[in-house]
Image (tube, rainbow, N blue to C red):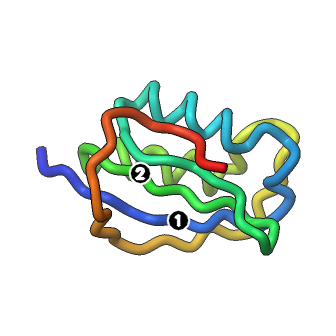
């Protein structure tokens, strides 16, 4: 299996609903590394690295709506080359 990294921007009602924490839990369950962080425009940025099929599973989870209280309107993503490697999936502030 080949490892990939993607950066995604999740738009909708995704701040103040535990979105980053739920994303961290799901990404960790899938064995991914990277981070989730809130952006000033109200969206959440997610960087996820790991086996291609697992990254695709996280993207599908994001597109399906994430945590119960969130309302995802759209998810944009593209391949990403991070400046560093992560040892886990964290939350950035």
Quadrant (top left, top right, bottom left, bottom right) of the N terminus:
top left
Where residue 11 sits in the image (x, y, percent)?
Answer: 74, 67
Q: In this rendering, would 80 be left or right of 51? A: right
Where residue 70 sits in the image (x, y, percent)?
Answer: 83, 47
Looking at the image, which is closer to me, 6 or 35? 35
The local crowd at label 2, few if under 14, some if 14 to 19, many if 20 or more residues have their Cα within 10 Å, is: many
Asked if marks 2 and 1 touch (Cβ < 8 Å), the reply is yes
Secondary structure found at label 2: strand
Where residue 8 sits in the image (x, y, percent)?
Answer: 52, 65
The local crowd at label 1, few if under 14, some if 14 to 19, many if 20 or more residues have their Cα within 10 Å, is: many
Residue at 41% across / 74% down in the picture?
78
Looking at the image, which is closer to me, 7 or 55? 7
Residue at 38% across / 62% down in the picture?
6
Would you name the residue on which mark 1 appears? 8
Residue at 63% across / 53% down in the picture?
37
Would you name the residue on which mark 2 appears? 48
């Amino acid at each position: 299996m080949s490892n990939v990294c993607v950066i995604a921007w999740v738009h909708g009602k995704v701040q103040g609903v535990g979105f980053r924490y739920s994303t961290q839990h799901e990404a960790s369950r899938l064995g991914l590394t990277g981070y989730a962080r809130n952006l000033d425009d109200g969206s959440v940025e997610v960087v996820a690295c790991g086996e291609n099929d697992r990254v695709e599973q996280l993207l599908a989870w994001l597109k399906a709506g994430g945590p119960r209280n969130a309302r995802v309107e759209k998810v944009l993503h593209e391949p990403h080359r991070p400046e560093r490697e992560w040892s886990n999936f964290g939350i950035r502030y």
